[in-house]
Image (spheres, rainbow, N blue to C red):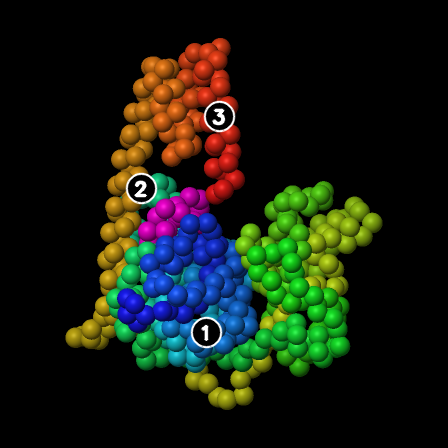
Amino acid sequence: MSNSEKLSIVVLGTSNSIAKDNWLSGFRSVLPAGSIVHNYSLGANCAGVHVANVLLHESDIQHADLVIVDAAINGLSHVEMGLLSQETEIEFLRALYSILGELKKPVISMILPILDRAKNKIYKNRIYKKHLALLNGFGFITVNMYPLLPDIEYLPQIFRDNNHLLSTLMYRLGCRLGELVQIYGDKLHPGAQRARSSKYDYNIVSAEKIAERFNLPLAVEKNSAVSLPYIELNQSIVFNEYSNFELVGILHWHPHSLSRLKVRTSKQQIIKACRGKFAGFESFLHPIHITDSICFNAATESEAVDQPTIENRYPYLSFGRPRICAILLRTPRKTKISPTEKLKLILPKKGEQKNIFEESVKEIFAQEFRLFAAETAKEAQRIDKLIHIGKTNAESCYQLAIYYQLSQPTLAKLLIDLAVSASPGNTRYDKQQRKCNRIYKKYIKSR
């Protein structure tokens, strides 16, 4: 890879890889003209979704120069919620890296941080350690952001919410990553594999193949950012037909937004019911799920239903007739594999050279975290000063609100509210307050 060479890159990520102005936006901005990024990310997914996407899009990966994986942030949450076991999540990670290892492609795996775990230093759990050990064992590049974060007092200032860093920071990190990929492209190839491969063979059966087998019509989801063909098929047919395999999950469309459902239950209950065992639910850019039969029965088991039928209460689940895009299967490998190895972080041997790309990413990302935290703290002090001025001088507050209404709508709204409260009945202030409120609402909707 060189600075002028067109690149083909595949991304397997979470909501951090599809949010507006995320790291991938910055990464794309510095790539050579004509480069292609295939983004197969899904919010709130487990590693099983990545396994399915690798198999569905294997041809893209075979022709890719690089695969970037963002698969660490949701695994522990899904285990804690009881949606899948630690062993299942670890097996999915092993299967993902096994398949990518067999394709012999350069892989960068990013371990993105969660705010409460970073603050309380409770991220070093079994899944976290196994994930690092698997990456080390397969010889892939690891970008672990937890050790690079600034001091605890700065952490709330660099996170948008518990699971996402601020967009401006993510954008900057993406730019730096893209620049380093072009500089050190020849250092990205995986090292020697020291971890055992998955004990299963995974297989994906697409909607086209199922439709051909059962002579069923194909349809295409039109109201979505990503269009894939799907079929409507009774789940029992799938289970009976593929009984010789272990059905890991169904990849299917979610036809409606959860927020628009008029059902007598909370959004959290709906999410829990439709996530099922494999924890994939609607994402705002890529509404594909991985689930299994638990999805279609969860409501009856978890709560009493006071409406005539389950279908009326959860119409979007299409009970018994899921809109299937593909099914993910697995079978035990017939070839003998070595006993389960005791995975541990394998330190470089004395005198062994560390990967220059990985070390450069750590150094530059740590620097970006420190710089951004310092800039944010300085900005917070400046805003506090402006608010103090506004409290003592309504006219100054009004003028500052006009100045910042387009560049910083949140600050402008705060300032004009202070002016109006300090001088009620002032028509100029009231008019500017309405204007700031309109701009602020547009700004919130665009995020």
Tell me what residue is drawn at x 34 percent, y 64 percent.
32
Tell me what residue is drawn at x 49 percent, y 42 percent.
446
Q: Which span of residues is magenta-colored? A: 160-173
Question: Is 433 situated above or below 366?
Answer: above
Three-letter residue code for mark 2: Tyr
Quadrant for residue 297, please give it: bottom right
Question: Is 406 situated above or below 97?
Answer: above
Question: Is 76 situated above or below 52?
Answer: above
**Mark on residue 154?**
2
Tell me what residue is drawn at x 40 percent, y 47 percent.
167
Q: Is residue 281 visible?
A: no
Secondary structure of the residue carrying numbered label 1: helix
Crowding at mark 2 (Cα within 10 Å: few <14, some 14-19, many 20+): some
Q: Position of residue 302 (x, y in %)?
A: 69, 53
Give left or right: position of 394 versus 348: right
**Front position among marks 3 and 1:** 3
Three-letter residue code for mark 3: Lys
Secondary structure of the residue carrying numbered label 2: helix
**Mark on residue 435?**
3
Quarter of the figure with the N terminus: bottom left
Residue that badge 1 annotates: 61
Cα separation, mark 3 vs mark 1, equals 49 Å
Q: Is residue 271 visible?
A: yes
Most extreme residue toward the right is 308
Secondary structure of the residue carrying numbered label 3: helix
